[in-house]
């Protein structure tokens, strides 16, 4: 791993897993998402990872909805824009790629394997649903896997790579690292790599700190110094895993996509609140926070295209 002299904070602003009934603070509208992203950047985030939502909170893929979000964040910040290609497991691949193909961001997420991606447990905890779509949406994940076959991964690498987009490789298990190594050997995934370890999703690797250290050891074996590492855990383990990642020499990711909480039993009121908290932890470790331009240098991003939306 390239040990981080400056720690990149990524903020995952809204995501497609958590539903509006879980928190009144989850950004839904374009105005809310834009405000949340700008506040996160002002708090110290170098990268904003973007999903979009319909007015009732359903995950959205339509470029016209992203068009109400991406240019406005770019106009107000110098942040690196990272557009999802994961979207939702209920979207087609064309839908998942639509926004990233349209806006050609510097960075896009890349899910590195098909898996059971289960968050049906939300239905056991919510008693007052705001929208009719929410309960069947989360329950559906118990019966339907999240499909990320090699042909889909290759298509994404080629379609976005030729546009100058680089990738945040989201690895939910150790096998996903070996899948990434296959695409590196094939010349489709080009170092320096940004590997995002994801822990605590039912169906993926558990939120055990031994798993985090194991993932880093295997990544070191496969990629040497040709990668930067970041990690997050879903839900209550978010801050602990971000802290551990920084302590190991990696980067961090927070945001309401990954956890709705700021502390035990207390909902986060904003993405910026989570950024402020992890920034203080990272600085207490004696590490410096990366600016957006620092992140571009660390990850070998192209920078914003002249006249581009991203």
Image (tube, grey):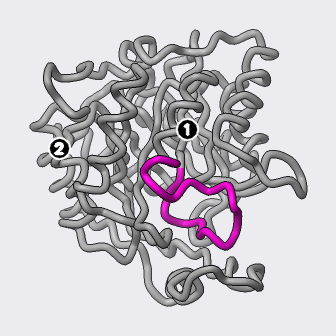
Residue at image position (49%, 37%) is 219
Magenta span: predominant SS is loop
171 and 177: which one is in front? Answer: 171
Image quadrant where one finds the C terminus: top left
Check the image and name the residue furthest to the front.
31
The residue carrying mark 1 is 11
Is 141 positioned to the left or the right of 106 in the image? right
Q: Earlier in the sequence, mark 2 or mark 1?
A: 1
Q: Is residue 1 above or below residue 182?
A: above
What secondary structure is found at the residue carrying circle 1?
Answer: strand
Q: Nearer the viewer, mark 2 or mark 1?
A: 1
Q: Is residue 308 above or below residue 27?
A: above
Is 30 positioned to the left or the right of 41 in the image? left
Q: Which of the 4 image quarters holds residue 199? A: bottom right
Q: Position of residue 138 (x, y in %)?
A: 56, 81
- On whether residue 22 falls in the magenta region, the answer is yes
What secondary structure is found at the residue carrying circle 2?
Answer: helix
The residue carrying mark 2 is 160
Residue at image position (76%, 48%) is 268
Q: Position of residue 160 (x, y in %)?
A: 17, 43
Residue at image position (56%, 40%) is 36
- On whether residue 262 falls in the magenta region, the answer is no
Q: Is residue 170 above or below residue 9?
A: below
Residue at image position (72%, 57%) is 235
Span of residues in magenta: 14-32
């Amino acid at each position: 791993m390239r040990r981080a002299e400056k720690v990149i904070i990524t903020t995952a602003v809204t995501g497609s897993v958590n539903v509006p009934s879980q928190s009144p603070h989850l950004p839904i509208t374009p105005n809310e998402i834009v405000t949340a992203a700008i506040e996160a950047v002002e708090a110290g985030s170098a990268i904003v990872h973007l999903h979009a939502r319909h007015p009732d909170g359903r995950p959205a893929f339509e470029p016209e909805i992203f068009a109400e979000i991406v240019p406005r964040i770019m106009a107000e910040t110098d942040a690196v824009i990272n557009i999802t290609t994961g979207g939702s497991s209920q979207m087609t691949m064309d839908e998942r790629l639509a926004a990233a193909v349209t806006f050609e961001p510097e960075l896009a997420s890349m899910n590195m394997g098909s898996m059971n991606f289960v968050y049906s447990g939300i239905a056991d905890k919510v008693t007052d649903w705001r929208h009719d779509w929410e309960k069947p949406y989360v329950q559906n994940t118990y019966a339907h896997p999240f499909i990320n076959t090699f042909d889909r991964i290759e298509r994404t690498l080629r379609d976005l790579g030729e546009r100058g987009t680089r990738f945040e490789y989201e690895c939910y298990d150790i096998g996903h690292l070996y899948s990434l190594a296959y695409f590196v050997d094939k010349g489709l995934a080009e170092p320096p790599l940004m590997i995002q370890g994801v822990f605590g999703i039912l169906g993926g690797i558990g939120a055990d700190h031994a798993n985090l250290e194991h993932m880093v050891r295997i990544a070191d074996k496969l990629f040497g110094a040709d990668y930067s590492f970041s990690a997050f855990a879903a839900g209550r383990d978010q801050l602990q895993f971000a802290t551990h990642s920084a302590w190991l020499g990696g980067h961090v990711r927070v945001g309401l996509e990954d956890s709705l909480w700021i502390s035990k039993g207390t909902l986060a009121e904003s993405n910026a609140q989570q950024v402020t908290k992890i920034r203080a932890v990272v600085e207490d470790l004696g590490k410096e926070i990366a600016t957006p331009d620092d992140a571009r240098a660390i990850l070998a991003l192209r920078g914003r295209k002249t006249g581009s939306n991203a």
